[in-house]
Each structure stands twice: as structure tokens, then as C-alpha cells.
Image (cartoon, grey):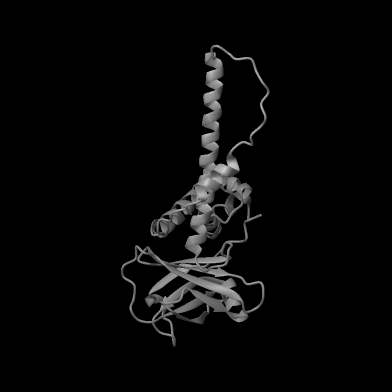
Amino acid sequence: MSRSMRYKNATVCDHLASQYVAGAMSARVRRRMETLMRDYREMDTAVAHWSDLMTPMQESLPAQQPPADLWAKIDAATAPAAKPQRAQAPVAKTSWLASFWENLAVWRFSAMAGTVASVVFAAALLWNVMGGAPGRGADYMAPMSRNGQVALVISAYKGEEPGTSQLVTQWSKRFQDKPSGPLHLWAEKMDDHSLVYLGQIDSGKENWTLTSAEWKVIANSSRLLINDNPATLDVAAVAFEGPCVQLNAWKS
């Protein structure tokens, strides 16, 4: 497939757009992706679609306040070290140029402190939102939707040892029509589109430990589906469904 045709392929565009919107790309790869968005209308359209898909989930995140001692730590980390000053002859009048540079230095320091605070606050917010999930990015993610509205997000984290991988479910606070009965999770395999039952979603428990076999099913699935019947699944009558996107493939 030629380079031009590759980046017009719907599957390729959807895969790259999902990782771009999810923030799974490195800075270098993001710059490359932004070039592709300018060059290929199909890629730009795919990114817009994923942005619309993720917006309800982002808006549903609760507001978080930074720790009380955060600002003091930022001030301590960014304040310039005190240096002994040599005695200088008193200056009767400060020139306008010296005053300008003094004000500019203060402005630069304020801007730097604000940038650092934003980065630290974003990191703290992400940590709180992830709750009991491992302290790193998810390996796979599936935004589960119904009628175009994201109801919950399922994230998969690979464990360091077999049988320690985790599945994390997070319901959107904006979704008001949450089913009251038991829900069951299925995976559709990427190669032959067969359906594999993974288990019941416990409404009172967000973390779900996966066996080695279950992890392989997640890693090789094209999408996840949720219904109310553990015995069989009718793909035309699922409660929620969403593409299972690998997030760690484009980090380099």
C-alpha cells in the first residue's frame, strides 16, 4: 500500500486518531501525527470523531483540588537561590531601562511558576482519577457507548507477573441511564470475530484481576461488548460496545 493510500485507510486513521486523542503518543510522534492531519483530510476527520467521543468522559471527571502545601513546594522549588551581594555605590535614580528589565524578570518568574503549577496539578489530577489503577498509562482502553454516548471506560493494565493484569471500569457521571441489573463483559477477537465471555461487571468494584488467558483475549480483541446475559450474546442487541484500542504501540 502506498504512503498516500495508507493514511487514507479508515482503519489506520481510526487507530492513530484514537491514540492521538488519548494522549498515548510521544511528543515526536504527536508532531508527526499533526502533520498527517494537515495533509490528509481523512486523518483530521478521524481525530475530530475521537475528540467528540472522548469529550463527555473528560467533562464527567470531578474537579480536584491540589494539596494545601503544593504552592509552598512550588515556590521553594522555583525560587532563585540567595546569593551574597557585593557592596555597591548607591544609585540616586533608576533608569527606565533598568526598571523595564526588573519588571520583565518578575514576569518571567511568574510565568515559569504558573507553568510548573499547571504540570504538577495535571499530574495530581490524573493520579486521583485513576484511583486504584497502576501508576502508569493503560495498555488498552475501550470507551463503551450506547447511542453515541460514552457510558463507561474500560482500561486494561498488563501486570509484571502472569495473573496480575488488571481491568478497570469507570462510569461516566454524565450517563444517567445506568442499568440496574447485572452486566456481563464480552470480547470480540480480532482475527476471526468470535466472541469470548470474560465475566460479570461488579458495580461495586472498579478493579478486576485478569488471568493470563483473559489478558490474551483483551490484547487480541477488536472491541468489547456488554450485555445482560452470560450465556449468549446477540451483537445486534448489546447494552454497550466500544473499540478496544492499544495505547502503547506509538509511544516511541
Q: In this view, does 217 lie to the left or right of 226?
A: right
Instruction: Report the quarter where the C terminus lies.
Output: bottom right
Picture coordinates of residue 29, whole percent (x, y):
62, 50
Residue 158 occupies quadrant: bottom right
In this view of the protein, which residue sits in the foreground, 26 or 223?
Answer: 26
Instruction: Report the quarter where the N terminus lies.
Output: bottom right
Picture coordinates of residue 161, whole percent (x, y):
67, 75
In this view of the protein, which residue sits in the foreground, 83 or 168?
Answer: 83
| Residue displayed at 58% across by 38% down | 79
Q: How many labels does the image show?
A: 0
In the figure, 163 relative to 139: above or below? Answer: below
Looking at the image, can residue 40 be seen? no
In this view of the protein, which residue sits in the foreground, 166 or 18?
Answer: 166
| Residue displayed at 66% across by 20% down | 87
In this view of the protein, which residue sits in the foreground, 139 or 218?
Answer: 139
In the figure, 202 relative to 130: above or below? Answer: below
Residue projecting furthest to the bottom: 231
Residue 245 occupies quadrant: bottom right
| Residue displayed at 56% across by 22% down | 101
Looking at the image, can residue 62 be seen? yes
Q: Is residue 111 left or right of residue 251?
A: left
In the figure, 179 relative to 250: above or below? Answer: below
In the figure, 92 relative to 165: above or below? Answer: above
Residue projecting furthest to the left: 177
